[in-house]
Amino acid sequence: MTPRLLLIACVSFLLPDGAAAPYPTSVRGARDRHLRSDDVAENEHAEVPDLTAHAFNHSYFPSLVSVLGPKEISDVTDPKGPIQVYARVGFLLSILISVAFAGCYRATKTWPSIDRELGQGMSHRVWSSGPFDCFENIPVCFWACCCPALRWADTMDMQGFLGFWPAMGVWTVLNLLSFAGLGFVWLLAIGGVTYYRQKMRRSFNMEGQGEICSYCGDCCFYSCCTLCAVAQEARHVEFAAKVDHPCVKDQRPPEPQCTEESQAPLLAQMN
């Protein structure tokens, strides 16, 4: 659909059918010529999609069809139209790319080195950083913006709430269902991430945990700025890992230990 046709469609949608001023003279002339075309008149009505199933005001559709024609409208509204097909293909490709990056991320994931002195005198009852301090940790900011499913899944995994792949699968499936037009899934997704954010508050014994204001604040934060919420939680967990906080201590992978038996082959080669 060209920008000119898109503009005409918007005007046709906003103004009632039959009004004196919905279209310029040139557009009305084009519409009249379209209606008088004998070679397409018979097929035109047969190809018009069922517009009542869409979210537009049905009373505006006759003027929209007369300007754009049934084919242009079908390209936009038909679930099997090219625009919808391209959108689905693009979404599936994004999932495949996310899974590929997630595999590379997991393969190269390293936990922060422990520095217990860093956490001395600091309280974990509040967030280690503000909601919009995204540039305090550039890698976390990058992953939260480019692949929030990956970063959120890693945060859940570091706390032991969910495994990495199950958490990423839950995020991806909810996004897929929301993309399919199931509006209630969006509410379900917001409720789910809010629940785990509150669980994180309880885990760190944060102030305001379980309070109504805290629930409402977390819900609004995730609704209005999901990426910032994902990044803030990730920064807090990464900082907890640095100071070896008990909430993440059990999930830390064991450090490789150098024993005499493991060093024997290396010493033999050196000799």
Image: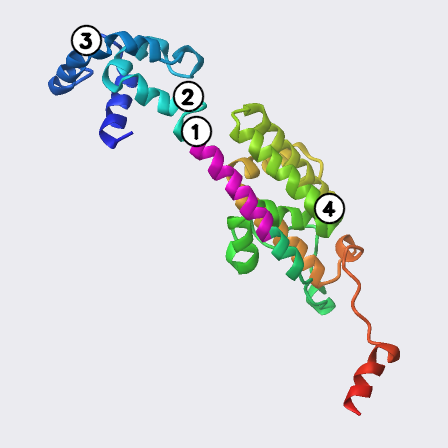
Say which of 71 and 225 sits in front: 71
> What residue is disc 4 on?
163
SS of the residue under disc 2: loop
Q: Are marks 1 and 4 in contact (CB under 8 Å)?
A: no
Q: Are marks 1 and 2 in contact (CB under 8 Å)?
A: yes
SS of the residue under disc 3: helix
- Mark 3 nearby-residue class (10 Å; few <14, some 14–19, many ≥20): few
Question: Against 145, is 18 above or below?
Answer: above
Q: Which label was assigned to residue 84?
A: 1
Per the model, the C-alpha gap separating discs 1 and 4 is 33 Å
Taking the image as shown, residue 20 lies to the left or right of residue 64, namely left
Q: What residue is shown at x 19% (from left), y 14% (from top)? A: 34
Front: mark 3 or 4: 3
Q: Mark 2 or mark 4, which is nearer the start of the sequence?
A: 2
Taking the image as shown, residue 43 lies to the left or right of residue 115, namely left
> What residue is disc 3 on?
38
Q: What residue is shown at x 63% (from left), y 46% (from top)? A: 152
- Residue 100: in magenta span: yes
Q: Mark 3 or mark 1, which is nearer the start of the sequence?
A: 3
SS of the residue under disc 4: loop
